[in-house]
Image: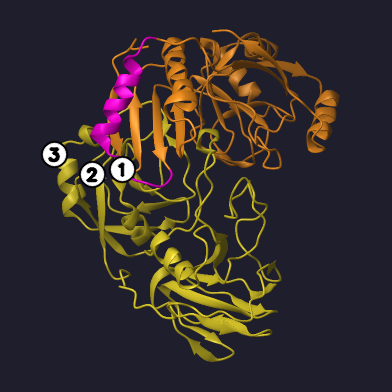
């Protein structure tokens, strides 16, 4: 078991997500930054569906009660193992009793901690990803324990990876959303010329952006939305839906983020700037 | 099939959107359901697709790989253009109990006032129509039920509540529905349903599907309490019968 000594700001367990229930209103959930989470899993040679810990801004303090191997990635949050530094994207051996702590966030917003064979929280409706009301809680609290398997020896094929850091980038590649054609010239000009600031309304469901587009009176029937769908409210506010976002919506879906752009958005925090760049699908 | 002019558009690289005319209409929904049944049972059977119908649209999402749009859109058009096969899917009529007790029906006096009816008349109206499930979204198991009588069309509350109770039955515009979990919400609350609309402990966590019909019937407080206990221990089964379009 892994014991949560300190919870951090918002620490959750996430895998690839929950499929097959979109038509019942259940979002996919899963790790927000697929790019980074996949890398840490790959270094440990985990199955693609292995669950990782998603750490938001302020990391937890964790104590391991059996041997294993871990790998950290995603946001740059300095980590120490019993006071020794732990490098990101490097397979690190853990001994029974080790304590992992995190320092101050340097870059990005969401860090990932993978453990050999993945975290073993219960699978509910096909996934371990935390999401209320599917799982009883949506984040870990002090005193919680998380199961993992004991691994005393592991010889990684690749023990360290130089990962191209995309954390400093701010261009979100997008394709046209279903209601893109309804935008007028003025709205289009603002959309692709301005930088947009991440508002303090940002979480696993959605990121709201501060700067507005000219408003509109477009009315449409409620229809499906996806992670990465950019909605435009009548007042001109842009809402970027993320992994826990609702499965349907009634606002025009003007853009759709690429998979890479969703990972990049997931690493943005309050006050960060992003720009949209249109790409052919 | 091929009854309507449909549009097919890309929706990111993993999804494709099919749209029927922009109207809330029983006949359109039925056409959509026929086509989604075909996709589920023949066209896309066994493949890694999510099929999400809602009002006048169907969104198809592939769980892994990108879609080659032109090729897939053509396939969909061909399928839609084929002569109709016999009805395959089933639609169900669900009878759901609602307790309109004043403790639960917090907006009932205001709804009655706005529509110039008595509270009893509102309850009678709400329980005497059969509603159509056009969409599930917002929250797991949250139903957008259409087919309300004019008298019950009440706009959303100008200021949403930060907490609406699980099971709260609401009215909003042309829709009625049930909050499947405690959540913020702006619908006008006129009662409470003891049947859980989403239960992750069940193999099928949400028993209802888009296209199904719902009829509400009024129950007393004591009956509500009983059903609530039955639902908690998992022995309550909502009444259903096959519904023929």
For the magenta stretch, what is the residue range? B63-83
Is A60 magenta? The answer is no
Q: Colour of chain A?
A: yellow
Q: Which chain is in orange here?
A: B
Q: Residue at x 44, y 84 (%)?
A: A87
Q: Residue at x 63, y 33 (%)?
A: B206
Instruction: Specify the quadrant of the image occupied by residue A24.
Output: top right
What secondary structure is marked by label 2? loop
From the top left corner, tell me how far across and down residue A124 is, in percent: 64, 49
- Local packing at callout 3 (Cα closer than 10 Å; few below 14, some 14-19, many 20+) is few
Q: Is residue A2 above or below residue B124?
A: below
Task: Mark yes or no: residue B181 visible.
Answer: yes
Label disc, if present, on residue B12 of the rendered structure? 1
Q: Is residue A174 above or below residue B207?
A: below
Which is in the foreground here, disc 2 or disc 3?
A: 2
State the residue position of label 3: A185
Q: Main secondary structure of the magenta part?
A: helix
Chain label for disc 3:
A
Q: Is residue B211 above or below residue A33?
A: above
Cα separation between marks 2 and 1? 7 Å
């Amino acid at each position: 078991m892994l014991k949560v000594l300190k919870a951090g700001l918002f620490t959750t367990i996430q895998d690839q997500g929950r499929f097959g229930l979109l038509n019942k209103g259940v979002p996919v959930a899963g790790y927000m930054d697929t790019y980074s989470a996949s890398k840490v899993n790959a270094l440990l040679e985990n199955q693609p569906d292995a669950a990782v810990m998603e750490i938001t801004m302020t990391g937890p303090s964790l104590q391991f009660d059996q041997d294993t191997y871990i790998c950290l990635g995603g946001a740059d949050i300095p980590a120490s193992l019993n006071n020794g530094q732990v490098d990101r994207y490097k397979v690190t051996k853990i001994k029974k009793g080790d304590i992992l702590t995190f320092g101050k966030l340097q870059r990005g917003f969401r860090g990932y901690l993978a453990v050999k064979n993945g975290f073993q929280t219960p699978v509910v409706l096909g996934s371990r990803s935390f999401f209320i009301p599917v799982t009883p809680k949506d984040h870990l609290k002090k005193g919680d324990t998380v199961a993992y398997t004991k691994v005393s020896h592991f010889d990684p094929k690749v023990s360290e990876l130089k990962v191209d850091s995309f954390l400093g980038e701010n261009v979100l590649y997008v394709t046209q959303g279903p209601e893109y054609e309804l935008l007028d010239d003025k709205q289009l000009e603002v959309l692709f010329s301005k930088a947009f600031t991440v508002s303090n309304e940002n979480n696993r469901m959605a990121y709201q952006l501060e700067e507005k587009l000219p408003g509109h009176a477009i009315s449409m029937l409620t229809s499906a939305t996806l992670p990465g769908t950019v909605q435009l409210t009548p007042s001109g506010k842009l809402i970027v839906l993320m992994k826990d976002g609702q499965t349907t919506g009634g606002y025009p879906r003007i853009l759709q983020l690429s998979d890479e752009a969703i990972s990049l958005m997931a690493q943005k925090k309050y006050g960060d700037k992003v720009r949209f760049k249109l790409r052919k699908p | 099939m091929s009854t309507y002019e449909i549009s097919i558009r890309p929706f990111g690289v993993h999804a494709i959107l099919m749209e029927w005319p922009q109207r809330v209409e029983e006949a359109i929904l039925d056409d959509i359901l026929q086509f989604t049944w075909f996709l589920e049972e023949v066209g896309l059977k066994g493949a890694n697709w999510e099929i999400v119908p809602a009002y006048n649209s169907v969104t198809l999402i592939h769980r892994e790989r990108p879609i080659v749009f032109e090729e897939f859109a053509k396939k969909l058009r061909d399928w839609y253009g084929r002569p109709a096969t016999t009805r395959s899917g089933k639609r169900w009529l669900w009878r759901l109990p609602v307790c309109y007790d004043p403790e639960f029906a917090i907006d009932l006096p205001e709804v009655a006032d706005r529509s110039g009816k008595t509270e009893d008349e509102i309850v009678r109206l709400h329980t005497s129509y059969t509603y159509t499930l056009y969409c599930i979204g917002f929250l797991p198991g949250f139903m957008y039920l259409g087919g309300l009588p004019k008298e019950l069309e009440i706009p959303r509350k100008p200021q949403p509540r930060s907490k609406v109770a699980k099971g709260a039955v609401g009215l909003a515009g042309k829709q009625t529905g049930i909050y499947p979990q405690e959540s913020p919400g702006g619908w006008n609350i006129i009662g409470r349903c003891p049947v859980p609309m989403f239960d992750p402990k069940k193999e099928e966590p949400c028993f209802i599907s888009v296209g199904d019909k719902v009829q509400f019937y009024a129950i007393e407080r004591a009956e509500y309490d009983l059903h609530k206990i039955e639902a908690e221990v998992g022995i309550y089964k909502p009444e259903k019968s096959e519904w023929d379009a």
